[in-house]
Image (spheres, helix red, strand yellow):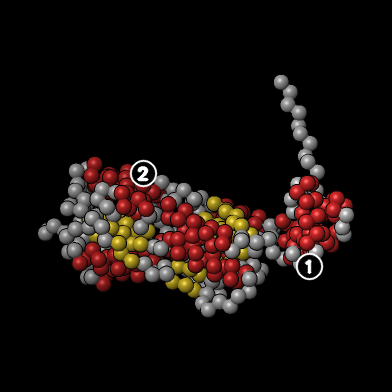
Amino acid sequence: MVYSKKKRQISVSIKDIANEAGVAISTVSNVINKTRYVTPQTKERVIESIEKLDYRPNIIARGLRIHSTNTVAVIVPDISSSFFSQVLDGIEEVARKRNYTLILGCTSFDYNEEKRITNILLNSFIDGFIFFSGFDNYELIKKIYDKNVPVISLDKDLGDCNIPTVVIDNFAAVESSVDYLCKFGHKKIGYISFTYDKQTTVRKRFEGYLSGLAKNNLEYDPDFVLISPQMRLHETTFTYETVKNFLKKGKIPTAFLTVADVFAFGLIRALKDEGFNVPKDVSVMGFDNILFCQFTDPLLTTVKQPKNLMGNIAMNLLLDIIEGKEISSKKIIIPTTIIERKSVAFAKKQ
């Protein structure tokens, strides 16, 4: 069987609409862009012609005329993660309310892919960018800022007071988690994370862990720290395998902090499969408070990041900048809280 290639349909222009409606091209433009008053009768005639010819406006051409496409790009490292998707939901919620469209660029934690996607979008008349987590990539974001394109850094602090930023205090959040475990008598506290190269957010959490230990006069033991680049895109499964191998060594802490809830899920499963009781033998704390924390066994004690709120605030801040509104602060720090559930208990006496 031979398939014939369909001819591409010729696009309808506003000149075609003007001819069909019997009006000037400028009148059609005024109806579409709502730039000048058009009588109801003429407006109805133009709209009928638009529907008859199935006219679709060229958003790029329109953007060149009015210097806006009402389109925002969000650069995100992983759309499969529950944490990222919940923040994206908050971003989209505001975009919808304020009549903007999102373009999503997923980088899969690939530094070069982030640069490639961003450079393509920079040439696509995007009104603004949100760089959500992923690599620091300061030079790339600074390049956008220097081109006077509105840009927000979400979930990572680049250390530049000029670039608008929406973050939590990652250092303080993890330091407080160590304090919390110490209240339960834990003196041997392990830590599970992916690597933090070019990732300020992850590095600050690790620094918070170290500070928490020092603050509570606890000795840092590198044997209790499990960090691997392979945990990046296979958080739960690789954590499970890593912990299973770690437990074979016989030397274990009485509690573990994890850099994300998804690590805690793999950790709890590995501990149970090796005969440990959580939390009687080993306590576990997560980070993020994603939905599944309420369905683990035991229910997961974790640090809550207000994910939907983070997305709301970042998107509103960006759109206010795009629309020329006054900005009271370029750096917004959103507070975190510890959600107490059932995965932390008092340490056994040594």
> Where is mark 2, residue-wise?
237
| Residue 184 visible in this rendered orientation of the protein | yes
Q: How many labels were placed on the picture?
A: 2
What amino acid is at disc 2? Thr
The three-letter amino acid code for the residue at tag 1 is Tyr
Q: Residue furthest front?
A: 41
* Other-residue count near label 1 (Cα within 10 Å), few / some / many at <14 / 14–19 / ≥20: few
The residue under the point 87% across, 57% down is: 23
Q: Secondary structure at mark 1?
A: loop
Q: Are marks 1 and 2 in contact (CB under 8 Å)?
A: no
| Picture quadrant where residue 256 is located | bottom left
Q: Position of residue 185 (x, y in %)?
A: 17, 64
In-image side of 39 versus 236 (left or right): right
Residue 210 shows in the view: no
What residue is drawn where x is 19% and y is 58%? Answer: 345
Dot in front, 1 or 2: 1
Q: Which residue sits at x=16%, y=60%?
A: 346
Image position of 54 with respect to 316: above or below: above
Left or right side of 222 for 346 = left
**Residue 82 placed where, x, y %?**
42, 52
Estimate the spatial distance between the alpha carbons at disc 1 and disc 2, rounded to whole Å: 61 Å
Q: Earlier in the sequence, mark 1 or mark 2?
A: 1
Figure quadrant of residue 201: bottom left
| Left-right relation of 294 to 320 | left
Tell me the number on the disc at residue 37: 1
Residue 166 numbered tag = none
Could you say whether the residue bearing mark 2 is in a helix, strand or loop? helix
147 with respect to 315 (left or right): right
In the rendered image, the quadrant that contains the N terminus is top right
**Residue 229: percent from left, percent from top:** 41, 51
Q: Quadrant of residue 2?
A: top right
